[in-house]
Image (tube, rainbow, N blue to C red):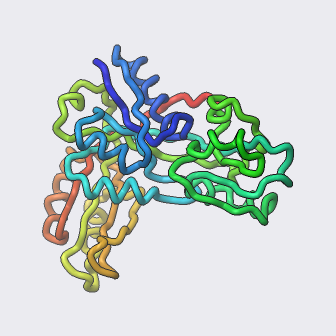
């Protein structure tokens, strides 16, 4: 079986690293082959799957320091045809990459907004006067570094190796136990879903909107899970983008969707939600992450 897997590019991003780890897991589990397909944004990675350009996408959903990746959540809500097939967790160790001879020469630092936020304490302590510039990915600015000795980028040590660039500082994220959870996403009805190896699902992700912003609108759906003894591992709100004060709610549940308790919960949930989307049940894969 041959697969194409979309991810945030250019090459060297953490999403590409996560996709490569998933490919390694696949090749050890099956005889599958995969081609990585870099995209300019997380949204375009998911759209590539929805449009049938790729079979899978590997996208970040949550970081241990900065929380949820909102572009992933918003795009998944907008695209009705997608489901989560697997999850994996990648340790994140940021480095400062630059052709400058010292930190004193640097006037601007580029990176993805999540990476910049994960290193804001270090930047404040060691580069307090530089301009911090958010861009689409951690690797987008790397090709500019050799032409401009006054700029730097925050990316992985693997990215520095790929582009043959020097590292000025290592492990600059503010908290050492930094990790990001990624989802492997496919089309819900795609034939490839039935061919991919699958471990026993341990989690289910859903999202819903409520009919009106009234007292108890969120409490009643949550009470269903409490009464049935189902644990929730994450709950997040996102604006519906229709009106100020209207929200969608994303929930990760520690249960397979096919259990009797979950079937009961989802049936009851329909009575208290306006739109309910079930993104699928999946397991969190154990993958080796060589640094």
Question: In the figure, residue 206 lies in which quadrant?
Answer: bottom left
Residue 218 location (% of width, % of height): 29, 74
Q: Residue furthest bottom?
A: 215
Q: Is residue 261 left or right of residue 37?
A: left
Residue at point 70%, 63% (across, down)? 131
On the question of residue 148 being in view, the answer is yes
Nearer-the-camera pick, 174 or 44: 44
Residue drawn 67% across the image and 48% down it: 153
Q: Between 103 and 264, which is closer to the camera in this rendering?
A: 103
Res 283 seen here:
no
Image coordinates for residue 6, horizontal then vertical, percent: 38, 36
Residue 140 point in image, percent of width and height: 56, 45
**Compared with residue 260, is residue 28 higher up or lower down, i.e. above or below?**
above
Farthest residue, direction front = 147
Which image quadrant: the N terminus?
top left
Q: Residue at x 34, y 46 (%)?
A: 203
């Amino acid at each position: 079986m041959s697969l194409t897997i979309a991810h945030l590019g250019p090459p060297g991003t953490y999403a590409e690293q996560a996709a490569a780890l998933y490919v390694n897991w696949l090749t050890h589990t099956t005889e599958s082959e995969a081609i990585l397909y870099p995209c300019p944004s997380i949204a375009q990675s998911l759209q590539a799957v929805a449009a049938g350009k790729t079979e899978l996408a590997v996208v970040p959903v949550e970081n241990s320091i900065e929380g949820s990746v909102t572009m992933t959540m918003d795009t998944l809500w907008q695209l009705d045809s997608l489901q989560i097939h697997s999850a994996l967790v990648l340790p994140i160790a940021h480095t400062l990459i630059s052709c400058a001879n010292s930190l004193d020469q640097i006037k601007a630092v580029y990176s993805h907004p999540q990476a910049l936020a994960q290193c804001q304490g270090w930047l404040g302590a060691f580069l307090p006067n530089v301009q911090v510039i958010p861009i689409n990915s951690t690797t987008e600015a790397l090709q500019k570094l050799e032409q401009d000795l006054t700029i730097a980028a925050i990316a992985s040590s693997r990215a520095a190796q790929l582009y043959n660039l020097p590292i000025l500082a290592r492990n600059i994220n503010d908290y050492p136990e930094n990790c990001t959870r990624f989802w492997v996403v496919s089309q819900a009805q795609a034939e490839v879903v039935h061919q991919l190896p699958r471990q026993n699902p341990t989690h289910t992700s859903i999202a819903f909107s409520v009919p009106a912003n009234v007292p108890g609108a969120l409490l009643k759906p949550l009470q269903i899970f409490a009464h049935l003894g189902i644990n929730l591992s994450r709950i997040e709100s996102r604006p519906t983008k229709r009106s100020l004060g209207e929200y969608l709610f994303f929930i990760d549940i520690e249960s397979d969707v096919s259990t009797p308790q979950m079937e009961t919960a989802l049936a009851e949930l329909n009575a208290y939600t306006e739109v309910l989307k079930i993104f699928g049940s999946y397991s969190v894969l154990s993958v080796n992450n060589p640094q």
